[in-house]
């Protein structure tokens, strides 16, 4: 397959085979499991987030170009990992820099390099053969509800959220202007086992460097503060499921 922005031809046979199989089973949700989750008690967990956590990169900024503000690029690499591709942080950073799909300059501080917006992340995914749709940017205002996001996750779609890091981490210094300033992916859902009510989402958050955050539980209350009520917060959803 040829990358959409003039890159070398890549061997994506495994990805294409996975997507073909998933297309035939798009309506089949990932089977939820009843388990104990810290802070939530016994709940139904959808999406198998704890099983995939070790495969994902939950520490950004560890790349050969020393781009430390690359949460969005790591989010793309993690979505590609879920889709069955072996794409490292190094590869996705070099790819993005080489094709003008992130912020990068040798004159900037490391934590200012690697930044993206949702449309640059969408273009990166498309270059690897995965189409996606953006919801909730300021231009269209069609922000997805947490329940809609949960249903996409449970059906195997890849989900990338743009959130406010300060509210997501309960860290006032990271709130800044209150808009979206951080990118993460959603890998699981947490529901009440009796009512089915959504209690939270499980995310892989690369911004909490030095901590194990490959399967971090975020409550609905936290998500409302960090996503639902945040100006410019977006959801990037793969058009097809990427997980069996």
Image (spheres, grey):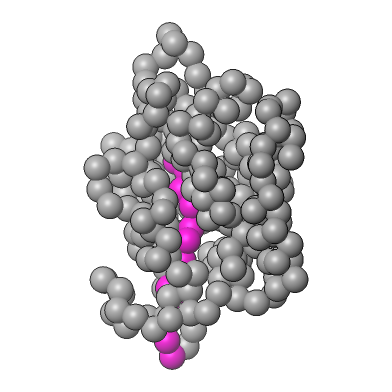
Give whichever of 242, 229 is nearer the camera: 242
Residue found at x 73% / y 62%: 20
Name of the residue lying farthest toward the top? 107
Residue found at x 34% / y 41%: 59
Q: In the rendered view, would you say 36 is above or below 140?
A: below
Check residue 54 for magenta coloring: no
As drawn, is 63 to the left or to the right of 41? right
The quarter of the picture where residue 7 lies is top right
Q: Position of residue 158 (x, y in %)?
A: 58, 56
Q: Position of residue 96 (x, y in %)?
A: 57, 28
| Magenta highlight: main SS | strand
Q: In the rendered view, would you say 145 is above or below 33?
A: above
As drawn, is 117 to the left or to the right of 127? left
Residue found at x 49% / y 69%: 47
Q: In the rendered view, would you say 109 is above or below 192?
A: above
Give whichever of 16, 144 is nearer the camera: 16
As drawn, is 52 to the left or to the right of 228? left
Q: Position of residue 206 (x, y in %)?
A: 38, 44
The stretch of residues the image draws in magenta is 182-194
Q: Position of residue 14 (x, y in %)?
A: 64, 53
Check residue 187 for magenta coloring: yes
Give whichever of 197, 215 is nearer the camera: 215
The quarter of the picture where residue 154 lies is bottom right
Quadrant holding the C terminus: bottom right
The quarter of the picture where residue 152 lies is bottom right
Q: Is residue 208 visible?
A: yes
Q: Is residue 143 visible?
A: no
Residue found at x 37% / y 37%: 60
Name of the residue lying farthest toward the bottom? 194
Quadrant holding the N terminus: top right
User: How many numbered discs sit on the rendered protein?
Assistant: 0
Q: In the rendered view, would you say 145 is above or below 91?
A: below
């Amino acid at each position: 397959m040829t990358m959409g922005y003039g890159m070398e031809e890549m061997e994506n046979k495994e990805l294409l085979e996975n997507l073909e199989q998933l297309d035939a089973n798009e309506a089949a949700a990932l089977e939820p499991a009843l388990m104990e989750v810290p802070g939530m008690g016994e709940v139904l967990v959808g999406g198998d987030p704890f099983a995939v956590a070790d495969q994902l990169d939950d520490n950004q900024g560890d790349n050969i170009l020393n781009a430390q503000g690359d949460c969005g690029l790591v989010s793309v690499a993690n979505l590609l990992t879920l889709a069955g591709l072996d794409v490292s942080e190094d590869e996705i950073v070099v790819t993005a820099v080489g094709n003008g799909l992130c912020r990068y300059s040798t004159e900037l501080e490391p934590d200012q390099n690697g930044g993206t917006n949702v449309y640059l992340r969408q273009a990166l995914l498309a270059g690897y053969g995965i189409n996606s749709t953006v919801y909730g940017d300021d231009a269209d205002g069609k922000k997805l509800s947490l329940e809609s996001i949960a249903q996409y996750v449970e059906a195997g779609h890849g989900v990338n959220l743009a959130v406010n890091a300060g509210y997501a981490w309960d860290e006032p210094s990271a709130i800044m202007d209150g808009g979206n300033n951080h990118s993460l992916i959603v890998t699981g859902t947490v529901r009440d086992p009796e009512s089915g009510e959504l209690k939270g989402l499980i995310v892989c958050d690369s911004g909490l460097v030095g901590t194990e955050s490959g399967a971090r539980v975020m409550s609905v209350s936290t998500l409302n503060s960090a996503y639902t009520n945040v100006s410019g917060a977006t959801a990037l959803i793969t058009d097809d499921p990427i997980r069996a």
